[in-house]
């Protein structure tokens, strides 16, 4: 069932241009850990998921971003995490510390989008992202992409999509709404 839901959401993420190629990853919480997409998996056809325990080393093949997923699950009431590479969000995050959406959906779903920095797949990035997600459904990693959490995979996806839409609107408005 979780494989089917990850595939369904992955196809939506890919169709919306929130990822390209085999970038991005997703996970869902399970007893004792979480299931995550494999390193190099295409989100529109992710294949088998990898179980990562809450503690201890991750098995071979788990997404290289597994430390970020683990940190989010440790510090949030998350049941699902989506990591995407939405281009407008990435572009806007180079110049600001947070994004404040001006469109209605963005103000509703992600009224404040923090921007963090860190090396891909690092424990430090996990701490930065999980800290930012304590007060937001989505955060942008400068130059890299978004991480969003939800009580369902659908919620995490919707936060990702809303953040990209808001960033696209801000881009079209000439970037007003960014907080330096």
Image (cartoon, rainbow, N blue to C red):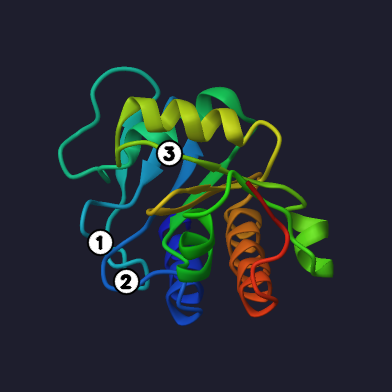
Q: Where does label 3 land, which residue? A: 117
Q: Quadrant of residue 4?
A: bottom left
Asked if the residue under mark 1 is in contact with the one under mark 2, i.e. CB atoms within 8 Å, the reply is yes
Q: Is residue 157 left or right of residue 37?
A: right
- State the count of labels: 3
Residue 44, how many percent across, how many down?
A: 37, 73
Give the SS element for disc 1: loop
Q: Is residue 95 left or right of residue 14?
A: right
State the residue position of label 1. 41
Residue at image x 62%, y 60%? 154
* Label whose residue precedes the other's in the sequence (3 or 2): 2
Q: Position of residue 84 (x, y in %)?
A: 44, 59
Label 3 environment density (alpha carbons within 10 Å; few <14, some 14–19, many ≥20): some
The residue under the point 60% across, 54% down is 156
Decide: is 88 above or below 180. Answer: below
Closer to the camera in the image, 164 or 83? 164
Circle 3: element type: loop
Residue 138, image x, y percentages = 61, 48
The residue drawn where x is 61% and y is 36% is: 133
């Amino acid at each position: 069932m979780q494989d089917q839901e990850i595939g369904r959401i992955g196809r939506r993420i890919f169709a919306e241009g929130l990822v390209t190629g085999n970038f991005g990853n997703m996970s869902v919480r399970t007893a004792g850990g979480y299931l995550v997409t494999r390193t190099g998996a295409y989100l529109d056809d992710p294949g088998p998921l990898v179980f990562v325990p809450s503690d201890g080393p991750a098995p071979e093949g788990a997404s290289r971003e597994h430390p970020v997923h683990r940190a989010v699950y440790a510090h949030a009431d998350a049941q699902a995490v989506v990591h995407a590479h939405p281009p407008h969000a990435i572009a806007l995050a180079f110049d600001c510390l947070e994004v404040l959406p001006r469109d209605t959906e963005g103000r509703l779903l992600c009224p404040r989008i923090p921007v963090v920095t860190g090396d891909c797949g690092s424990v430090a990035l996990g701490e930065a992202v999980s800290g930012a997600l304590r007060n937001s459904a989505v955060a942008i990693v400068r130059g890299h992409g978004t991480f969003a959490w939800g009580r369902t995979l659908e919620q995490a996806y919707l936060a990702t999509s809303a953040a990209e839409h808001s960033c696209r609107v801000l881009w079209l408005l000439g970037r007003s709404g960014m907080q330096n």
